[in-house]
Amino acid sequence: MMSGRRSLAPVEGWQIAGVSARGASHLRSRAPNQDALRLWQGKGSSPALVLAVSDGHGGAAYTRSHIGAAYAVNTAVRVLARDLLPRLITPGSPPDLRLVKRTCDEWLPKVLVRCWQERVRRFTRRYPFTADEIAPLSPEGADKPTDSLTPYGATLVAVLLTEEFHLYLQLGDGDILTVATDGTVSRPALPVDARLLGNETTSLCMAEAWRNVRLAFQPVLGEPPSLILLSTDGYANSFVDPASFEQVGADLLAAIRADGLAAVSEQLPDWLAQTSAAGSGDDISVALALHLSK
């Protein structure tokens, strides 16, 4: 988990920043921030970026969801940056975009979910469940949970940015907004998950969770978005309707153009805390990628 503010130096036309704010309801109940975020940028001949946010589930059964969220964003960076990229890009040679898309569709979901599940299972072996953690999961009289993944339940929203293509990834709820140079806000063409209703969400802890991974692959054919925003669902749930939330993308781009990304990211923790208090009460995490126009 990463709380507060973080920004990284520009890399090949992009600058990135991220903020995770503990929700108002969690402050009142003294619950931890169950969100996590991670930013990664390549070096040298690999000018790629990965941004990831995750929301650990609330509820009595999800006693380690903040740990599951931290593993989710760390796994996203590991798989996207260290496992996937070397398969797709050879320095000095343009990638075969058809092969890139096929690899993302066929290889990525299973590897991503398997890696997360292996990591949380290793954590459980090292730190077994306590009696209090077992109680909400087990049938009466059982001495261990029927499902060792459930306590770590979390969502994942991530993006991989390269010079040649952008890959958007989502499992469960959360949001991705892209903002064009003229301030027009849109969303990547991710497949719709009809199960994301109310407080229901798909999760990394579900059986065959890889089937719930949704991808949108976009070759970079022209000017990329001026701003890409990833957020956990506590942000959108603080607004009365999707249009009001989407306006945040245009407003943030205008503020960044006026004051700079560093100044805006300094203010974001307070803005998100106020948004949570007036809205969902939930933790809110936001990751931003700003395209630096020449």
Image (tube, rainbow, N blue to C red):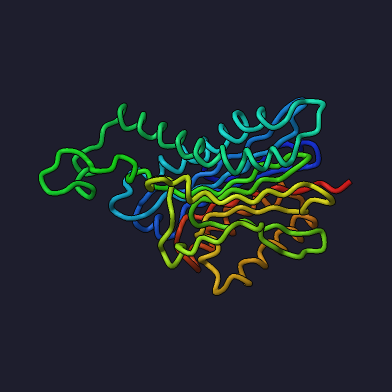
Which of the two residues, 34 or 44, is positioned nearer the viewer here? Answer: 44
Q: Residue at x 84, y 51 (%)?
A: 222
Q: Is residue 276 above or below residue 86?
A: below
Which of the two residues, 110 or 196, is positioned nearer the viewer here? Answer: 110
Would residue 165 appear left or right of 92 to someone viewing this image? left
Residue 50: give x, y in percent of width and height: 64, 39
Whether residue 33 appears in this view of the structure is no
Would residue 13 appear left or right of 190 to someone viewing this image? right
Would residue 162 appear left or right of 120 to someone viewing this image? right
Q: Residue at x 51, y 48 (%)?
A: 156
Residue 42: give x, y in percent of width and height: 70, 31
Whether residue 273 appears in this view of the structure is yes
Q: Residue at x 73, y 53 (%)?
A: 227
Q: Is residue 242 above or below residue 270?
A: below
Among all residues in the image, which is located at the extreme right? 294
Among all residues in the image, which is located at the extreme bottom? 240
Which of the two residues, 294 or 220, is positioned nearer the viewer here? Answer: 220
Badge count: 0
Residue 282: give x, y in percent of width and height: 45, 59
Residue 248: give x, y in percent of width and height: 66, 64
Q: Residue at x 66, y 32 (%)?
A: 85
Which of the two residues, 163 or 50, is positioned nearer the viewer here? Answer: 163
